[in-house]
Image: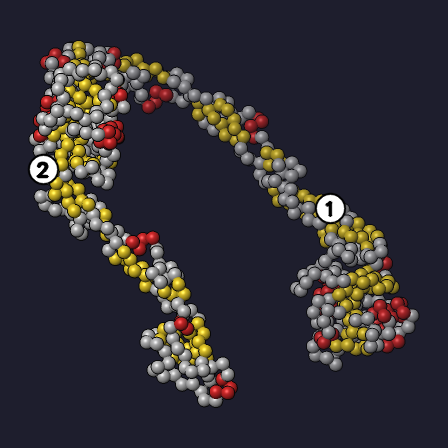
Amino acid sequence: MWKFLLLLAAVGTLPAASVGEQVYLTTFDNWYFWKIRATGPMTNANVKVTCESAGMRYPCYYSGADRCTFFWASDCITFHHHVGCSTLWALSSELCGHTDGYGSQCQPLDDTFVCIPGWVAVSDDSAYGVDYDTHTWGLHGADYNNMYALCAVPTCGRSPCAHGTCSDDAVGYTCSCENGWTGRDCDQDMDECASSPCAQGTCTDEVGSYTCSCENGWTGLNCDQNIDECASSPCTHGTCTDGVGTYICSCENGWTGLNCDQNIDECASSPCTHGICTDGVGSYTCSCENGWTGLNCDQDIDECASSPCTHGTCTDRVGSYTCSCENGWTGTNCDQEIDECASSPCAHGTCTDTIGSYTCSCENGWTGLNCDQNIDECASSPCTHGTCTDGVASYTCSCENGWTGLNCDQDIDECASSPCLLGGTCLDHVNGYSCVCPKDTTGKNCETVPFAGECYQFSPTAAAHPDAARACRAQDGHLVDVTDQQQQTFLADKIAASTGVSTWLAVKTTVIFFSNGAPFSAPLQWSSSEPAEPCDLCVLLDSRDSFLAKTAPCTEQHNYVCQDDLKPCGQNICQNGGICTSCFNDSAAFCDCPAGFDGKTCEIDIDECASDPCQNGGSCHDDINSYTCICPTGYQGDHCESDMDWCSQVTCPLGFVCQDFTFYFLCAHPTPITRGVKYKCNSASCPDGMYCTQEGVASFSCKPE
């Protein structure tokens, strides 16, 4: 069933946009009249397209009734109205009750255009239009855009349904089609063959039905049932397979023919090569001659069939066989294994016998197929800093000086023994070390230091008292003599800061002497544990008793301190006027630097400008033990700390007043108007190093060049 819906349906192809606004006008002579908003110029062609796009038809300027066909064409609708031929007159009469202005004075028809074939007054296919606002008719549609097209839809009174029943509604009609018909107006024969209902046949369309002409082998209303040709059991000794219009027989063994009704003679091909053939149904039997076997008596009896060669290849003979053994096996049937280890092939390893071969498990340090090659453990160069000596399953590294470890890859830390004394810092090197000594301390191990005009050398090793005394004398010195408490405190502090162990003094024997042989009479502070009259013992500073003096057997091993006088250096190593003193045969030297210099050899010029002493942007020039500030213009003083008073140092011309501006000064006459004559700069206007600039009628400035 098709329903003609004016507001929803669209018929045909609209080349422009979709259907525009639709306005229902009126109904008469079984036609619904509408005006529809068009897109583009109001030509006859556009009016037609607009109506067809809305699923409607269109009227012409005349009705097409009797004697009203002048401005009409056969594709336009035909209607009758009592007012005459004009479509716009008829609509104006129905809508507004009059025909004044050819419809231009009827408001519902405002901006409405109607198709007008044969309008000779124009050549641009213009439709005919009316305008209510100006009461103008005969508008050329080609000059107007987007106005209304006049369209129409028939009612059921015009019997639009060719093969169906028509039903009117408010905006159109609906056709309920008879069986076999379709389309909006039930005017299209429905093709029942369109769905291809005939599976194996040809379809013939009829009104409301169809007929199938089946292909060979098919039957049924839709030719979809295969005819079973096997239903009559045509295969006598076989199985029937139905085909399309035919059948196929699959015969049982021994039978042939179209219907499997002929016995096959299996002996006809003489299958028994060395024997007599007996035919059966679907088979035959061979009676073999002597020495032959097999279904067709074509196989020589194989003595190798029982696989007599256990590990070899069997060759069949007439009534016998021979074995060709695999590698590693022997015997008639190749069932005896050959022992490859019997010859002891592994020189330094254990032999394992395998089939046709052997393997050697080598002892540690040996390799090769027969374990007869010594592995060179030195081949990988394992000794990082040393020489490698190969052994059996091992190697030995002879390390270079300064290196240790299994592979000579560990740097010996020469600082581990803390060789630097008296606060020195140890720096480890490869096969050595160096000490960074504090100020006024020298020696390879920072062991020598001056104090109160004397030179002291602290030993890093221990010795018996006599050996210690000889060691000091060998350096043109002697074991230290403690002559006052200040010296003892100095020694105790230095020992505590370095070795921290008990240390020999020069004092010894029952009658105590100094190193020069003079009797001991110094106020030496003794430990409370000492006897009132010491025996023949030597004296040390005891580390366990705050480095107080204590006697001990002279054979004990203790560290010691050598003492020597400070003397002028044999060769002056001090720079920049430093005074050089040395001790212990010039093995230790000290520099007393003049003011302004520093460093071990007075090599460092102290930068007195480092503290930025110059103020107000002054630049500092470093001198020896002094500095000089170069002040910017306008400042003075040792540190550029004072503002320069220009006016106290210069004299302006008579009658002029000086004004100080820090970096320059200005001379100005207090009454420039009364002066009369303009001041001119000259060579005497400013001090040397400044230039004159006229600043007005009666003033000038002096600024640094």
Residue that lies at the very extreme toward the bottom in this rendered image: 676
Mark number displayed over residue 600: none
Kind of residue at disc 1: Gly
Q: Residue at x 21, y 14 (%)?
A: 531
Q: Residue 363's x, y, as percent?
A: 16, 17
Quarter-wise, where is residue 617 in the image?
bottom left
Other residues around mark 2 within 10 Å, as few (<14) / some (14–19) / many (≥20): some
The residue lying at 75 percent from left, 65 percent from top is 37
In primary-sequence order, the first of circles 1 and 2 is: 1
User: Quadrant of the rendered structure where residue 558 is?
Assistant: top left
Residue 585 numbered mark, or none: 2
Residue beneath the point at 24% across and 19% down: 527
404 sits to left or right of 172: left
How packed is label 1: few (under 14 Cα within 10 Å), some, or many (20 or more)? few
- Look at 82% across and 64% down and name the residue there: 33
Please tell me the numbered disc located at residue 208. 1
In the rendered view, does 580 fall on the left or right side of 269? Answer: left
Q: Secondary structure at mark 1?
A: loop
Residue type at the position of mark 2: Asn
